[in-house]
C-alpha cells in the first residue's frame, strides 16, 4: 500500500471509529467493569490494546499506537508526553547502573544533557561516537555496552549515519539499537527494515504538524516491545486523549504537508548555495552533501529542516540576520506549518568525539508552508541586514 494511503487508513479500524470517520476522543482515568472476571482478564492483557486504567490508554490512544506501528513497522508503540520523554523512557527501559551507552556525537542537545547529567548519576556510562563511523563502531563496544543510540540525520548538523551497518554490528553483540527517527517522520524512513530495535518520534513535530501539542512515541520490534511497554507503564508515562486525537488528525495530512516542506526546502537550499556569504548548505538531499548516497539508499524523501554555515559573521551580524524576519519566526522545535530560524555561534562546544570542520556561524531553518517566494524575499532581506551590520 502506498504511504499516502496508509496515512489515511492507519489506526482507523472500526473497533476504534465505530460509526464515525475518526476515532472519538475517549477521556478516562477509571475504567469500570461489569464482572470480576472481566476485571481480572483486563489486568492480564498488558500486551494488548484493552482498556484497564486510564494510564494504559483508551481507544483513542490505541488507535494512535496502532497507526504508528502500521507506518513504521513496529510490533508495539508507547506514548509519552513529549519527544524528550520518549528518549529517556526508551533509554531507561534498556539501561541500568553499570551499563555502557554508545551515543552519537551529533545528537539532539537535550539528549546529550540527559546522558551527561541524569544517566551519569544513575551509574550509566556514555561514550560519544562520530556519526559517520558506520561499522567501525565495533571498535568502541565494551563488555557492558547495552545500547547504541542513533540520530540520522543529525537535527542540527545533518550527518547521515549508516544505520544498517551499525545495527548489524549491534546484533552480533546483542546490543539494543535505538534511532531518533523524528527527521524522517513515520513515512520517509522504515527503521525496522534497516535493523533498528526501537524507533523514536517527537510527534510534537511533523506528526502533529501544527505546533500546538507536546507528544512522543517509541515503537519497538517484537523482541523488545515487552520490555519497552512494561518500563514505560511502570514509570508512569501517559498522554491525554485529546493530544492523541490531535496527532491522529495530523497524520492524515502528513504526506501532503511533507511534500510541500520538501519542495520548498530544496528550493531554498539550492538558492542558499548561490549566496556568496554561505560556506556550505547542510541538507542530505543535496548531491553535494557527504551523506547523500546513504540518504538516497535509506530515505524516500526529505523534509523542511536544513542548516547552512556562513563563511564568517559576528554575533551582532547573526542577530541582525535572524531578527526582523517577516515569515521566519525565532523559536525552537520544528515540523509545524510555520517557518522558523535559530542560530548557533560555536558548534565545536557541542562535540566531544568528532571535529566540526567549519568556523563560521550556523543558521538552522525550518521551511514551513508559506509560499517559497515570500521566504526567499525574507532571506534576501536578512542577508542585507547581515551585511549592513558588519
Image (cartoon, helix red, strand yellow):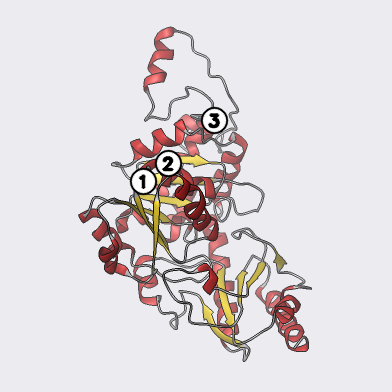
Query: Gap in Å between the C-alphas at discs 1 and 3?
Result: 28 Å
Residue farthest top in this picture: 35
User: Between residues 150 and 130, which one lies in front from this camera angle?
Assistant: 130
Q: Nearer the viewer, residue 349 or 135?
A: 349
Circle 2 packing at 10 Å, graded few (<14), some (14-19), many (20+), is many
Residue 351 horizontal side relative to residue 260, left or right? left
Q: Residue at x 50, y 75 (%)?
A: 283
Q: According to the image, label 2 marks what residue? A: 77
Neighbour tally class for label 3: few under 14, some 14-19, many 20 plus, Cα within 10 Å: few
Mark seen at residue 352: none
**Dot 1: element:** loop
Q: Residue at x 38, y 24 (%)?
A: 45
Between 118 and 297, the one lying in front of the other is 118
Q: Which residue carries the number 3 mark?
A: 19
The answer to whether marks 2 and 1 mark residues whose Cβ atoms lie closer than 8 Å is yes
Identify the residue at the far bottom of this view.
Answer: 276
The x, y position of residue 119, in whole percent, is 46, 48
Callout in the foreground (3, 2): 2
Determine whether the residue tagged by mark 2 lies in a helix, strand or loop.
Answer: strand
Q: Which numbered disc flags the more N-terminal residue, 1 or 3?
A: 3
> Mark 1 sits on what residue?
74
- 266 to the left or right of 377: left
Q: Which badge, 3 or 2, is on the more N-terminal residue?
A: 3
* Proximity of marks 3 and 2: CB atoms separated by less than 8 Å: no
359 left or right of 375 in image:
left
How far is mark 2 from mark 1, CA to CA? 7 Å
Amino acid at each position: 500500500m502506498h504511504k499516502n494511503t496508509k496515512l489515511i487508513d492507519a489506526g482507523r479500524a472500526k473497533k476504534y471509529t465505530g460509526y464515525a470517520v475518526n476515532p472519538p476522543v475517549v477521556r478516562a482515568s477509571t475504567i469500570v467493569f461489569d464482572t470480576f472476571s472481566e476485571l481480572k482478564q483486563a489486568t492480564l492483557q498488558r500486551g494488548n490494546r484493552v482498556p484497564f486504567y486510564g494510564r494504559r490508554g483508551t481507544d483513542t490512544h490505541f488507535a494512535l499506537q496502532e497507526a504508528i506501528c502500521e507506518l513504521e513497522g513496529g510490533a508495539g508503540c508507547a506514548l509519552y508526553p513529549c519527544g524528550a520523554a520518549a528518549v529517556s523512557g526508551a533509554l531507561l527501559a534498556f539501561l541500568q547502573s553499570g551499563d555502557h551507552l554508545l551515543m552519537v556525537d551529533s545528537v539532539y542537545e537535550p539528549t546529550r544533557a540527559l546522558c551527561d547529567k541524569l544517566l551519569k548519576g544513575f551509574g550509566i556510562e556514555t561514550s560519544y561516537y562520530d556519526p559517520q563511523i558506520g561499522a567501525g563502531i565495533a571498535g568502541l563496544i565494551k563488555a557492558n555496552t547495552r545500547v547504541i543510540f542513533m540520530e540520522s540525520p543529525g537535527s542540527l548538523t545533518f550527518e547521515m549515519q549508516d544505520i544498517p551497518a551499525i545495527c548489524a554490528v549491534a546484533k552480533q553483540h546483542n546490543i539494543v539499537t535505538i534511532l531518533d527517527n523524528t527527521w524522517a517522520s513515520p513515512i520517509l524512513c522504515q527503521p525496522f527494515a534497516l535493523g533498528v530495535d526501537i524507533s523514536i518520534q517527537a510527534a510534537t513535530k511533523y506528526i502533529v504538524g501544527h505546533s500546538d501539542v507536546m507528544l512522543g512515541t517509541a515503537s519497538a520490534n517484537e523482541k523488545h516491545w515487552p520490555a519497552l511497554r512494561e518500563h514505560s507503564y511502570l514509570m508512569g508515562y501517559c498522554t491525554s486523549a485529546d493530544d492523541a486525537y490531535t496527532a491522529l488528525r495530523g497524520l492524515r495530512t502528513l504526506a501532503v504537508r511533507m511534500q510541500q516542506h520538501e519542495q520548498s526546502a530544496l528550493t531554498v537550499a539550492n538558492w542558499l548555495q548561490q549566496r556568496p556569504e554561505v560556506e556550505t548548505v547542510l541538507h542530505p538531499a543535496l548531491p553535494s552533501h557527504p551523506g547523500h548516497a546513504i540518504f538516497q539508499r535509506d530515505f524516500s524523501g526529505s523534509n523542511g529542516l536544513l542548516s547552512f554555515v556562513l563563511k564568517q559573521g559576528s554575533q551582532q551580524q547573526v542577530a541582525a540576520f535572524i531578527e526582523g524576519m517577516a515569515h521566519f519566526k525565532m523559536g525552537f522545535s520544528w515540523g509545524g506549518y510555520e517557518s522558523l530560524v535559530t542560530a548557533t555561534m560555536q558548534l565545536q562546544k557541542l562535540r566531544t568525539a568528532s571535529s566540526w570542520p567549519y568556523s563560521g556561524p550556523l543558521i538552522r531553518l525550518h521551511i514551513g508552508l508559506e509560499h517559497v517566494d515570500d521566504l526567499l524575499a525574507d532571506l534576501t532581506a536578512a542577508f542585507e541586514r547581515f551585511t549592513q551590520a558588519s
